[in-house]
Amino acid sequence: MPVESTLLPTPSSCSDSGSMISTLTAPESIYSQEQAELGGIGLSDPEHASGRRRMLDVANELHLTGVQVDIDLPVIAVIGQQSAGKSSLIESISGITLPRASGTCTRSPTECRLFHSTDPWKCEVSLRILTDSEGRPLGQARNERFGETIYDKSEVEERIKRAQRAILNPSTDLNKFLEEGSEHLGRELSFSTNAVCLQISGPDVEDLSFCDLPGLIASVGSAGDEGDIALVKELVTSYIERPSCIILLTIACETDFQNQGAHQLARLHDPKGLRTIGVLTKPDRIPAGEEDSWLRYIRNQDEPLTHGWFCVKQPDSRAIAAGITWSEARQAERDFFRDVSPWSRLDLEHQNRLGTQKLVERLSDVLSEKVSQRLPDLQEELQELLTTTDEQLNKLPKPPSSDALSEVLHLLSTFSKGLAQFLEGTPDADGLLQSIRPACDVFKKAVRATEPDFRPYEFQASQRDPDGHRYVSPTFLLNEEEPYAPTDDSRAIYLDEVMHRAQQAITRELPHHYPFVVTEQYINAFIDQWKNPADALFREILRVLIKHTKRFVSGHFSQYPLLLSRVHSIVADFIMSSSDHTAERLQWFLALERRPRTLNEFHYNHYREKFLGHYKSCRPTADQPRATLVQRFERYLDPESDLHKHMNRVLNGLTEIGLPGRTPTDLAQLLPPDPCDAAIDIMAGVRAYFQVAYKRFSDNVPMAIDYELVLGLDRDQALEKALRRDLGIGGPDAHVRCKEYLQEPRHVADRREELMKKRERLETARRKLTEVWL
């Protein structure tokens, strides 16, 4: 096996190394010090180079902004398996020496920007930081200069070593790696997307820019990390998956083509080979008899590519040890392809595919052409991305104010104003009052259903003839409330029962006089049933209020989770405190109703008179025991009936004698005295009082809950005062507290920072691109 292979890092040795740079002494530079007077490939044609140089300058300026994170910028990415001769190729193009110590492998991208210049050769090393120590993208890329300008090529290798160590230790001051002894520092990261940047210029330097990516790893040693295989693949993929990336694919001729994963990865992202340039390395190591199989690539017969295949020959380890110069290496390369078969037998067309010089010329042309093609679209893409980024920023909450105390006070003030409108009611279908109203309707119906079910019949008569003694709804109530009828007879109170209770209650009263306690007992019987509907209404309004208030608070303070949580707690405590007072007020109303009284004599007397007539009209007549006067009155509705004619005559007569406005029902009062009139009087009085009291109670309870519980949240800014007090924004540490309250969620802050940095990159790139067109 040729000696040169032992100088290239293997996957296992690279992964086994405890740090990127071994403490062993690196081999001598691939070229001797004579190269100090020479550059890399220097074939710049002034006329052709002018436009090419301008395009490459544009690409370099855009890359300096870091905008390649956001848009597809043209770039040459050098990829290959480890030990594919990639480093030797880079050295031959750039004219510098890369770190080659045992245990060393490339663990971050190395960007080389080569410029033709009439000034003496020089190299500037910098670090392009695209991500922070946690791997998150920065805004505009940080381009940190790493050491002084180098004028001696022999110093480049050591500077690159130190730069690579700095890249892999993002939490350490990069200047420490410029000091002696830094080689003993550990390694925080296995690989990094941040790049070592080399800017090389000189009279014999070709205009070209490319990025050397870490070599793909096939396996790791026992002490290696299996995760590194995927890390490197992901890093390489992040470059070559972009449509504007030119893939410089290095394939070592000493290894079976199909076993080199770099080709499969390139083909995956460029299946038609439109932007891949193939490079065969180590042609001197092709096993005897297999040369023709490799020539098929040069002829573009196997794995054809739009830009074709090239082949380069770099010095072996013996030549390096002998101190071969760069110019001697290039001459040796030319001699190899001229003298060694089968390369020497290729026709002129394919001879132009041999040698580093031909490769660099083609790379430079392809890159400048790609930049030229992309320029017209870049400005539009940048503007579209800026617009999208601004829209995303506008969707985020405003960043916290620098004056936290004033901001919190402002939030509380606007919250209080909004709360007042919220409690007064909004026209929304799912507003607070709209959500409470159904519960009030249910409450009113529940109270209405407690009506005493008086039946002006004897119990036995109703049992003998249920149909003839059924419940009859008062017709005079139809114009003021919905009809109501009990669902069954379970709550029925019969005439004889009322009469019996009245007689049992007599103490010292005169004949035909009955104690008021009987009336009071019947009244309290239905009032006692009002507690459950009132409590149910209170609980439902409390539930709705808590739900809607929580939603209102969340909408107002959602930007600040800590403040939101605290406000939720204070508001909940305030509502519960108000609810306790409201519950006491409801009990007070119930206690008040248990002492029957009304000053609304007009309506009470009106209803009593109506119910007297109604109950009397429902009593059976002597000649028709099963018929009632009311049932006869039903026939009055028929204008052709005799009853209708007789009734009209009676009503007209009453009008003539000065009693107008009478109805057929009123005529029931003209019936002869009934022995149960006392019971009917009690029934009419209780039922009349129910009409007055239930309407009063149905109004007062919802109004009390609304006043005490709902509107009580904003009365005299009580809730705002409670918030100011319990948030502690009036104390000496108010500023500190408010600053804590306004801390926004980490994911929101991170998202804003990410978008702001992205906008900064895009804006900087847009300005750079605008300058190109000026």
Image (cartoon, rainbow, N blue to C red):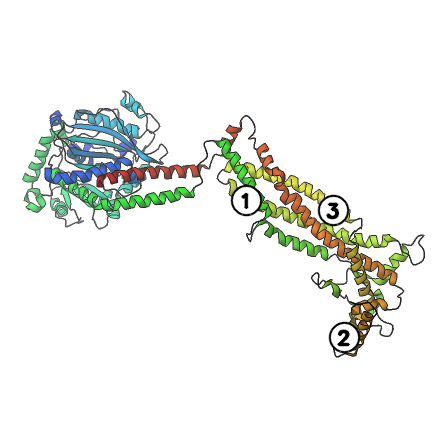
**Circle 2 residues within 10 Å: few <14, some 14–19, many ≥20:** some
Between marks 2 and 3 in the image, the one whose residue lies nearer the viewer: 2
- Is residue 213 something that shows in the picture? no
The residue at 60%/50% (across/down) is 433
Identify residue type, mark 1.
Answer: Phe
In terms of image quadrants, where is residue 453?
Answer: bottom right
Image check: 717 left or right of 505?
left
Q: Position of residue 78 (x, y in %)?
A: 22, 39
Q: Earlier in the sequence, mark 2 or mark 3?
A: 3
Q: Secondary structure at mark 3?
A: helix
In terms of image quadrants, where is residue 31?
Answer: top left
Residue bearing mark 1: 552
Contact, mark 2 vs mark 3 (Cβ under 8 Å)? no
Q: State the residue in front, 45 or 700.
A: 700
Q: Position of residue 55 (x, y in %)?
A: 19, 40
Q: Which mark is residue 58?
A: none
Residue bearing mark 2: 635
Q: CA distance from mark 3 to mark 1?
A: 31 Å
**Which quadrant would the C terminus be assigned to in this image?**
top left
Image check: 436 left or right of 67?
right
Identify residue type, mark 2.
Answer: Arg
Residue 170's place in the image compared with 575, above or below, is: above
Residue bearing mark 3: 589
The residue at 88%/57% (across/down) is 502
Residue 461's place in the image compared with 7, above or below, is: below
